[in-house]
Image (spheres, rainbow, N blue to C red):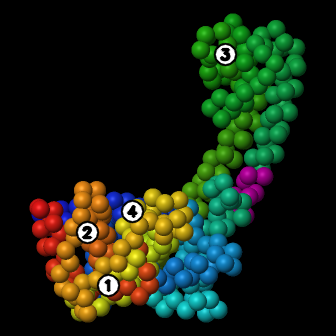
Amino acid sequence: MNETGSLKALDWPALLERLTAEAQSSGGRTLCAGLLPAADRPEAVRRMATVAELVTWLVAAAEKQIVLGADEVRPLGEIIAIAEGVRRAFLDSTRSPIPEIAALAAGLDPPRGLGRTIALTFDASGEISDAASPELARLREERKALTENARVAIERLMRAEEYASVLQDQFFTVRAERFVLPLKASAKSLGLGIVHDTSRTGETVFVEPTALVSANNRLKVVELDIRRESRRILEALTADVAAVAPALRACATTLAVLDATGAAARLGMAYGGSAISIVEEAVVDLRQARHPLLALAAATPKAARGVVANDVALGGAAPAILVVSGPNAGGKTVLMKTVGLAALMARGGLLVPAAPGSRIGCSAICRRFPAIWRMWVRS
């Protein structure tokens, strides 16, 4: 069985699915889905310390009713706003000391000028706002006035005698961005105006009255001017974005790392994990160790701690060999998977579902446990 097969047999892919579900951005989900155990002890220790820091911070934040984060990473302006908020939150020295997370947050340098520009450019609905350009605001006011004038004019025409006998319905509508009246099909040859459309049945023609052509033309010109001004604003904004593209990419990358770390922290809290010690010597000293997927199946972190736990000691003061025996369905496989997953989780920087004070030797587990597990599977 190769390493991939060993990971699958130990339920590592299933654990990563749960981890990925905790992430809130596509970048974070990608990092979670591709998480692999660290190659050495220092990296494993650093990863776990980072996750443990964030758990401490999240607990403290929850106690103070501080709500941070977003359901998803929004467009560029939202990324900048999130990056600014994250930087402020994690660099706030009045909260728990979190050096690893703070170091990540310190690397966030969002282009604040662009963020302010985007905030001014778009309103809550995502449309370009009047605040983006005085000219755009003026044109929109002009369009509003022209639209009202055209509406009053076409309502007056609806009451005119020349249209009384040919009007199909008592309403006006818009076709090709021009105000029109619904007339009977027999009226299209009477020269009352320009035909823009017909109904599905062919019994109604939509005619722009001759008296309204000038008003519709003025409205169309203003609409084109609005589009040109909107395009100019977007072109200028695009140039601003291009100028700070490296900073935006760096922010997105760091936020993805923080999101993945947050996912690990939330998942660790869900299964009641601890930041165990990762040591150099060949030792496994797991106290009250539980299988993380069984713990996650429980409704609450408190219930998760009620999952049957085991103490496992190998090496150090304990014998270097452990014989696992018992009847079928007695928990042998679960125990072996629990130890294997604990090793993988420690190397992956995830909190381990075991009591504080537990220890695991990175070098011993990295080199020996996969072979032991393959022997167990074959047997």
Q: Secondary structure at mark 3?
A: strand
Q: Amino acid at mark 2?
A: Met
Tell me the CA gap for discs 4 and 1.
20 Å
Disc on res. 336: 2
For label 4, the residue is: 293
Where 95 falls versus 139 (above or below)? below
Q: Nearer the viewer, mark 3 or mark 2?
A: 2
Of marks 2 and 4, which one's residue comes earlier in the chain? 4
**Quick one: label 2, few (<14), some, or many (20+) residues within 10 Å?**
some
In the rendered view, would you say 278 is above or below 335?
below
User: Which residue is tagged 3?
Assistant: 205
Q: CA distance from mark 3 to mark 4?
A: 67 Å
Report the front residue among 161 and 231: 231
As shown in the figure, which amino acid type bears the numbered disc 3?
Val
Q: Residue furthest front?
A: 327
- The earlier-in-sequence mark between 2 and 1 is 1
Give left or right: position of 20 versus 136: left
Residue 143 placement, left or right of 261: right
Q: Nearer the viewer, residue 196 or 36?
A: 36
Residue 225, percent from left and from top: 64, 51
**Total marks in image:** 4
Marks 3 and 2, the one that precedes in the sequence: 3
Q: Which segment is the magenta one? A: 133-141
Q: Which mark is residue 285?
A: 1
Relative horizontal placement of residue 141, taking residue 199 as reference (left or right): right
Foreground label between 2 and 4: 2
Helix, strand or loop status at disc 4: helix
Asked if marks 3 and 4 touch (Cβ < 8 Å), the reply is no
Q: Along the line of sight, which residue is nearer the eye, 138 or 172?
A: 172
Residue 89: horizontal and vertical position, in percent? Answer: 60, 82
Q: Residue at x 35, y 64 (%)?
A: 16
What residue appears at the point 76 percent right and 36 percent down from the top-left corner?
215
